[in-house]
Amino acid sequence: MKPLNFLVPFLVPFLALLLCEAHAAGDPVAGKAAFAPCASCHQVGPSARGGFGPQLNGIIGRPAGTTADYTYSAAMKNSRIVWTEQTLAAFIKDQDSVVPGTRMRFASWGYGDQKIADLLAYLRSFPPAR
């Protein structure tokens, strides 16, 4: 018996778990491509500002409806949501189920769990403006 063969039954599940976690965390490069349709309404980056939709720098952890450079719907301002990855993922899939009466309309066809994870990884790369 080779000296380390006894470790194989323990290492294989551990490595599989690591690969799954990395996959679930999202890929910001793929997320940039997933953001392309969002860019028609939203901006990210150092010069981002509200336009047809609010800028999304620092969106994760931010209370909904609070950026100063965008006029939000009453539904969004009164939602009492703090955006987490879970609430954002649910919102991307079905806006009205998360914030009934929101003005945002996005048909998320083709945005499965991995594409949303990639999008969120991309958005995480843009901290709040200082």
Image (cartoon, rainbow, N blue to C red):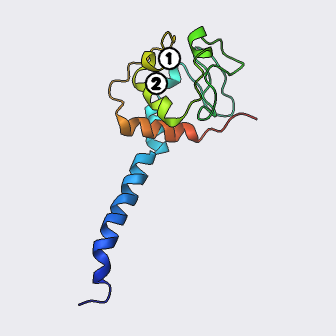
Mark 1 neighbour class, 10 Å CA radius: few under 14, some 14 to 19, many 20 or more? some
- Direction right: furthest residue: 130
What amino acid is at disc 1? Answer: Val
Residue visible at 54% across and 18% down in the picture: 41
Residue 91 numbered tag: 2
Secondary structure under tag 1 reads: loop
Q: Quadrant of the C terminus?
A: top right
Residue 56, image quadrant: top right
Q: Nearer the viewer, residue 123 or 12?
A: 12
Spot occupied by residue 37 in the image (x, y as percentages of width and height): 45, 24
In the picture, measured across the screen, residue 12 lies left or right of residue 106, that is: left
Q: Nearer the viewer, residue 67 or 47?
A: 67
Give the vertical position of 99 relative to 113 (above or below). Answer: above
Mark 2 neighbour class, 10 Å CA radius: few under 14, some 14 to 19, many 20 or more? some
Residue 9, image quadrant: bottom left
Q: Quadrant of the N terminus?
A: bottom left
Residue visible at 37% across and 40% down in the picture: 114
Give the vertical position of 30 relative to 4 (above or below). Answer: above
In the picture, measured across the screen, residue 5 lies left or right of residue 100, that is: left
Spot occupied by residue 70 in the image (x, y as percentages of width and height): 66, 15
Contact between marks 2 and 1 (CB within 8 A): the answer is: yes
Give the Cα distance between marks 2 and 1.
8 Å
Residue 60, image quadrant: top right
List the residue tagged with mark 1. 99
Spot occupied by residue 104 in the image (x, y as percentages of width and height): 50, 14
Residue 78 numbered tag: none
Spot occupied by residue 14 in the image (x, y as percentages of width and height): 36, 65
For marks 2 and 1, the one nearer the N-term is 2
Q: Nearer the viewer, residue 54 or 72?
A: 72
What amino acid is at disc 2? Answer: Phe
